[in-house]
Amino acid sequence: MDINLEKIRELFKGDRFATDAGVFIESVDTDEVVCSLRLDERHMNMAGVVQGGAIFTLADLAFAVHSNLAFVCGEGEGITLGQSCNISYLKSPKGEILTARSKCISSGRSMSVYQISVSDNLGNAVAAMTGNGFHIRK
């Protein structure tokens, strides 16, 4: 698979909610997609901790990039949309940067499952998400 990181970043600029929130695609390969988010005041909730939606948005973009990698690289027959996602918040981040790492657990003809782990730059496990994707043929 011919993976062009700049092309992938350009295509996913269309995922405006995530990119406007500051999510950045760090690296992409068939085994793992890594995205990051530098935290600032807009990511905090009223209690002064990182809003769960910011953490979910980071994990969700890693899931989206990974589950659509074949399509984006011209090898897939259609796109994958999230069918369901389950996230567990493990610990409030202490660092300034969050990193999401996506791994494919299973990918079939119409369904796929990805495990996304989120940690901060101090090594704290922040969240674990399972994303189930549904492939839509075009």
Image (cartoon, rainbow, N blue to C red):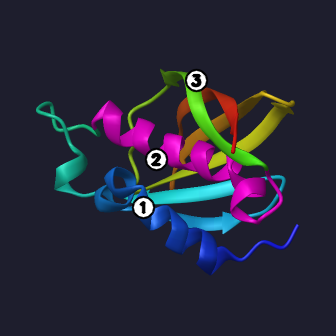
Q: Secondary structure at mark 1?
A: helix
- Pointer 2 or 3: first along the chain: 2
- Counting from the top left corner in percent of width and height, residue 125 is at 56, 37
Can I make out residue 116 in this image?
yes
Image position of 55 (left or right of 67): left
Viewer-side label of 1, 2? 1
Crowd tier of the residue under label 3, counting other residues whose Cα lies within 10 Å: few below 14, some 14–19, many 20 or above: few
Q: Secondary structure at mark 3?
A: strand
Which residue extends farthest front? 138
Q: What number is the disc on residue 83?
A: 3
| Amino acid residing under circle 3 | Gln
| Amino acid residing under circle 1 | Gly
Label 3 to label 1: alpha-carbon separation: 20 Å
Residue range (magenta): 51-76
Q: Identify the residue position indicated by label 1 in the image.
A: 14
Q: Identify the residue position indicated by label 2 in the image.
A: 58
Mark 1 in CB contact with mark 2 (< 8 angstroms): no
